[in-house]
Amino acid sequence: MDSHPMHEQSVSGESLPSRLCEALRFDSKNSLDLDSHSLTNSGSDNYTPLSNSREKHSPTDSFSRVSPSCNSFDTSSCFQESSPPVEAREVFSQNEQYGSWELQEVFNIMGPQSSPGEEKGQIMATPNVSLEQIPCGGLKHILVDCAKAISEEKTSKFNQLLEIARREVSITGEPIQRLGAYLIEGLVAKKESSGTNIYRSLRCREPESKDMLSYMQILYEICPYLKFGYMAANGVIAEVCKNEDCIHIVDYQIGQGTQWLTLLQALASRPGGPPRVRITAIDDPVSRFPCGAGLEAVQRHLAVISENFRIPIEFHRLPEFAPKFTLEMLGARPEEALVVNFPFMLHHTPDESVDVYNPRDGLLRMVKSLSPKVVTILEQESYTNTAPFLNRFEEVLDYYLAMFESLDVTLPRDSKERIDVEQYCLARDIVNVIACEGRERVERHELLGKWRSRLTMAGFRPYPLSSYVNSVIASLLQCYSENYTLVEKDGSILLGWKRRNLVSVSAWY
């Protein structure tokens, strides 16, 4: 286990007000200095937007029969050099601006509370837009009929419907057209029994250049229900650990460490000085983020936070996959308050329908044996685990259509960043759910109610999320679009788009 102590100087209580106010200013001079600790630098790969015309496909095209440059997952040939891309430093600075305001609201749960909407004007959110959509019923019905034809093994009918569907989809079109392009590839992969190979080839990769943020980081930025899901988890952690001197966070999918920026800022500004924080990252074998170099970037990121906010941080990384993790690897210390974080990871762990030993419930029981102060869980609010193929397809269609529609609020349809996110981050999950079976189907989502049952059987009890933090999040969501939703349910929250819940956040002890 690698240990990386970073900074060990405390903050005096009397300096708290000025430090907190300074952190809340939207001034570039307060941005974290990434010159010597940068995760990414400015780049030179520049592009102009795609046209919004529909793409034409031969009815004989199938993903398994053509080269990667000929299918819906390839867009590189469509771009030409133009304006510079978003630099990592600029995006990180913007993260801090968002994070600073979120910090204030989360920190308020430890002190006097203000009105949730009091500071709303500070959020640099995308204004509400009017969503103009073509009627999607026709294409939706065709796609469902394609899935039915596969389910009924009617190959001729499927090929006829596929020809019609291919003429209607476009990766730069309406949300249903964009989603349809990837659903078609999943259906073809299912029919050709090539889903596993396609899924592996679509694993969300880091950018080819160090100068660009990863696609998953962009996804985090443009999906408020992801961003504020993390905020809800941070809120309950801050509340539970507000009097702790030593905190150990075990993160089962740390990604780029973005989640912890606001929490560490809040802890650094705590009256009486910050606690010592130890973060242990455990690798998820299905993670979009690689270990090794990826975790080294997280370490540098945390070093910058430690230095700038004067909070002592240790970073440990465990190369073991989550199901192989053992208690001895953790190196628990009696003085530490243990926090365990499961961000969009538990559904990757096989359950009893895949493995008779039921690693999913086994992992929960193991974590319970650690006696954590709190366990936070973020999951997609979808059911694709044991559902038969046709039901899974309809669930994927409904879930991702809501997600694709929500992206209309944050990025234009011809945006390269949006196309990259949909292609490299969302398409892989879509293909896996539709086209893969058995152990190869690793995207096995469950609804909040099912997670509640599993956690209860493992000995956990629910820890209610802060109603105040929830109200803040609900207010912030409206800064983006009135179509974003937050539903409080039995101490947990469901974040979504219009009538569709997309993300669940819950806490347990």
Image (tube, grey):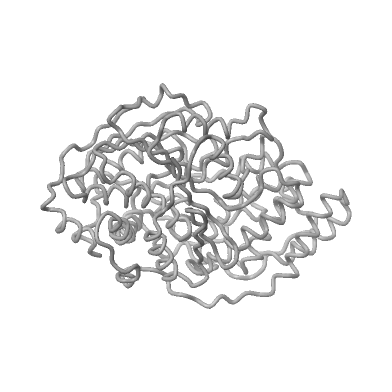
* Quarter where residue 232 is shown: bottom left
Q: Nearer the viewer, residue 507 or 435?
A: 507
Please provide percent x and percent y for residue 290: 47, 37
Query: Looking at this rendering, what residue extends furthest in the left direction?
Result: 14
Q: Say which quadrant the C terminus sits in.
A: top left
Q: Residue at x 39, y 68 (%)?
A: 125
Q: Nearer the viewer, residue 283 or 455?
A: 455
Q: Say which quadrant the N terminus sits in.
A: top left
Q: Is residue 238 above or below residue 146?
A: above
* Quarter where residue 91 is shown: bottom left
For this view, does 287 lie left or right of residue 74? left
Please provide percent x and percent y for residue 413: 55, 68
Please provide percent x and percent y for residue 333: 31, 27
Q: Is residue 368 above or below residue 113?
A: above
For this view, does 399 lie left or right of residue 492? right
Q: Is residue 356 above or below residue 259?
A: above
For this view, does 44 lie left or right of residue 455? left
Q: Nearer the viewer, residue 244 or 19?
A: 244
Badge count: 0
Please provide percent x and percent y for residue 49: 51, 66
Q: Residue at x 48, y 53 (%)?
A: 492
